[in-house]
Each structure stands twice: as structure tokens, then as C-alpha cells.
């Protein structure tokens, strides 16, 4: 991970966490959405390949698969591993509109929700890497750049914020653990 490289997300964020959280919140969700809409919203799209070949062919350098804590935890981990910062455009992160809607009703942040079906990687040319993956049926998007410093900036509608240290995954707000 080098300053100037692009950040790319493959897959869509929050799908696995949404499925788990929605299963515990069906009564609440049913007050706002039809059963068929909920079923469609929680359906996990195609899983990402785990073999290195496709990622190397795409031009991926540093690669992490997201998990608990969502894409924000994944960004934090990548930045921590390499002691580099980044600037990310929030609107570029691939997320379904239905995910945002269900999360809003449950009071969850989709960017901090388990995202086992997406990967984050760096590449010298993120637009080319994303295009390469899309041509092979893998959703991918350029989301930002690696910076020289250690600041982890998030841009949202022209406003700048900073990524906070990861906390417990959002799904545990609705999933009770013993």
C-alpha cells in the first residue's frame, strides 16, 4: 500500500450483517416494508472469489476481505497495517439502496455492518482494476486514494470527516448475544 495508489471495493457492503440483523428485526421491518421487499433486500449477491489469481490480474496490491465491523473496520485495518492514511468518497462505496433503507429503520450504520461479501484493495489504477472485475461479473468501484500521511478522511457531499476507531459491529445492536 503506497501513497498515490487507488482504493477499490469489490462486492457490496453490509449484506451478510444485514441478513443477520433483519432476521432478528422482522417484526419492526414488517411495519415499513413488504415481505417480498425484505426478502429481496437481504439476499446476498454472488460471493467473491478467494483465489489470488483474479485479484493479481486486476492489479490488486494490498487486499483485505471485509468482515465484522464492515467496510469502515476494513479501511481502518488496512491503514493500520501499512501506517498510511487515505481519502475515501462515501458515495462511491457500493451499497444497495434497500440496505440503507432497512438499516435506517433498525438504527444501524451500513458502513459498520458485517460485510463478508466484499473486499478492499489498493491498485495503481483503481478505475482499470474495477473495470477488469466488472467485465468478469464482479461488482467493483474506485472509492478513493492512499495518502502520504496517516489521516483517514471520509468525504461525504463535500464535507470532510475522519474515520473513527472501529467499535463493535452494528448488527449486535439488534442481535442479542449471551
Image: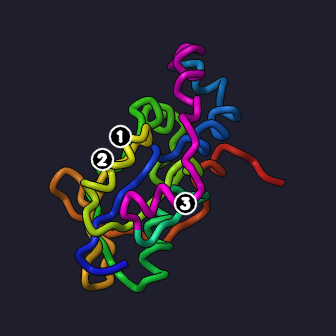
Mark 2 Cα within 10 Å, few/some/many (few <14, many 20+)?
some
Q: Is residue 27 visible?
A: yes
* Dots 2, 1 in contact, CB < 8 A: yes
**Element at badge 2?**
helix
Q: Which element type, helix, strand or loop, lies under badge 3?
A: strand
- Where the C terminus falls, by quadrant? bottom right
CA gap, disc 2 and disc 1: 6 Å
User: According to the image, label 3 marks what residue?
Assistant: 65
Q: Is residue 87 visible?
A: no
Q: Does residue 174 appear left or right of residue 129 in this picture? A: right
Name the residue nearer the viewer: 106 or 71: 71
Can you tell which quarter of the image residue 26 is in? top right
**Percent x, y for residue 85?**
33, 78
Q: Which residue is mark 2?
A: 131
Is the Cβ of the residue at disc 3 closer than 8 Å to that at disc 1?
no
Q: What's the magenta region? A: 33-60
User: Alpha-carbon neighbours of circle 3 within 10 Å: few (<14), some, or many (≥20)?
Assistant: some
Please indicate whether residue 43 sits to the left or right of residue 12 in the image: right
Q: Which of marks 1 and 3 precedes in the sequence? A: 3
Amino acid at each position: 500500500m503506497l501513497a498515490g495508489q487507488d482504493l477499490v471495493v469489490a462486492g457490496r457492503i453490509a449484506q451478510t450483517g444485514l441478513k443477520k440483523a433483519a432476521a432478528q428485526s422482522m417484526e419492526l421491518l414488517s411495519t415499513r416494508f413488504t415481505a417480498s421487499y425484505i426478502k429481496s433486500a437481504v439476499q446476498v449477491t454472488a460471493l467473491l472469489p478467494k483465489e489470488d489469481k483474479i485479484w493479481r490480474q486486476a492489479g490488486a496490491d494490498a487486499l483485505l476481505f471485509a468482515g465484522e465491523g464492515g467496510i469502515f473496520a476494513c479501511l481502518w485495518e488496512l491503514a493500520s497495517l501499512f501506517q498510511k492514511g487515505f481519502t475515501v468518497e462515501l458515495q462511491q462505496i457500493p451499497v444497495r439502496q434497500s440496505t440503507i433503507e432497512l438499516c435506517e429503520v433498525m438504527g444501524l450504520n451500513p458502513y459498520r455492518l458485517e460485510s463478508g461479501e466484499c473486499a478492499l484493495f489498493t491498485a495503481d489504477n483503481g478505475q482499470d482494476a474495477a473495470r477488469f472485475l466488472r467485465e468478469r461479473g464482479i461488482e467493483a468501484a474506485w472509492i478513493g486514494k492512499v495518502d502520504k500521511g496517516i489521516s483517514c478522511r471520509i468525504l461525504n457531499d463535500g464535507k470532510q470527516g475522519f474515520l473513527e476507531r472501529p467499535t463493535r459491529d452494528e448488527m449486535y445492536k439488534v442481535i442479542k448475544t449471551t
